[in-house]
Amino acid sequence: MATARALLVASLVLCCFLLPCYGTVLFSSLQRTLEVTASPTSQQVLKAGVDKITVTWGVNQTLPAGTDSSYKTIRVKLCYARISQADRPWRKTVDLLKKDKTCQHKVAARPYSAANRTTQSLDWTVERDVPAATYFIRAYAYDGDDKEVAFGQTTDANKTTNLFQVQAISGRHATMDICSICFSVFSVVSLFGFFYNEKRKAH
């Protein structure tokens, strides 16, 4: 009886350790098998809602055949560079991918076939809500269980090379600025007109 109880307790303890690990993927466990390039030049400034990025990706052709046999989907993301993560915990890099905040902006997702290892590409317009920061592009390969199994990116491991910047939308519009100026001029003219009429009445 005591032995059975001990086995039960041991099983429960083991489950408690295993459950947090189930379904989790560490970035450090992924192999960099994808070659990823993007059109912006180093330190180029792109305007949110206006400029486009051409992203190209494919499996490194020097790797052995079968390296990509489990790949089913490629997801491309816009990621914060190290310089734009400093003192910003909401952009913090965490090895546990489900908690990682490095790549918060989705660019695209494409199906992947190991039988066709040709390079793929797409054009993506920087979305209007992308904040001002320094970025790079990263692509993840997912397996049939929708788990990350590999990656590739346009920068080095330290996220310090081949970076580009995004200039955010200020929130003001040229038409609104013109209307504001016109309203201000009208207000001033009306004020002068009011004082002029009052002065005439006084005389």
Image: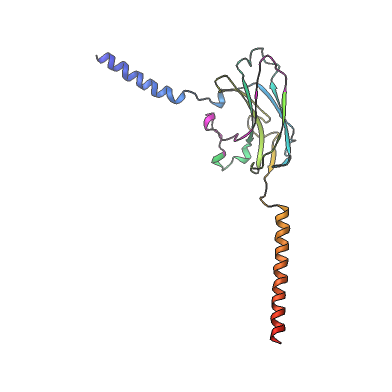
Residue 96: x, y in percent? 52, 29
Query: What residue sits 59% from the left and 39% below the top?
Result: 85
Task: Residue at 43% x, 24% y: name it.
Answer: 19
Toward the top, the furthest residue is 65
Residue drawn at x 54%, y 20% is 145
User: What segment is highlighted magenta in the picture?
Assistant: 91-119
Q: Decide which of 51, 150 is in the foreground and name it.
A: 51
The residue closer to the viewer here, 50 or 9, is 50
Which residue ends up furthest to the left in the rendered image?
Answer: 1
Q: Which residue is drawn at 69% across and 38% down?
A: 126
Residue lying furthest bottom: 203
Image coordinates of residue 9 in percent, x first then y, are 32, 20
Q: Which colour scheme is used?
A: rainbow
User: From what the image shows, is residue 75 above or below residue 114?
Assistant: below
Which SS type dominates the magenta stretch? Answer: loop
* Residue 122 drawn above or below residue 11: below
Instruction: Find out whether residue 37 is within the magenta segment.
Output: no
Counting from the top left corner in percent of width and height, residue 131 is at: 63, 43
Q: Quadrant of the N terminus?
A: top left
Question: Does 102 appear in magenta?
Answer: yes
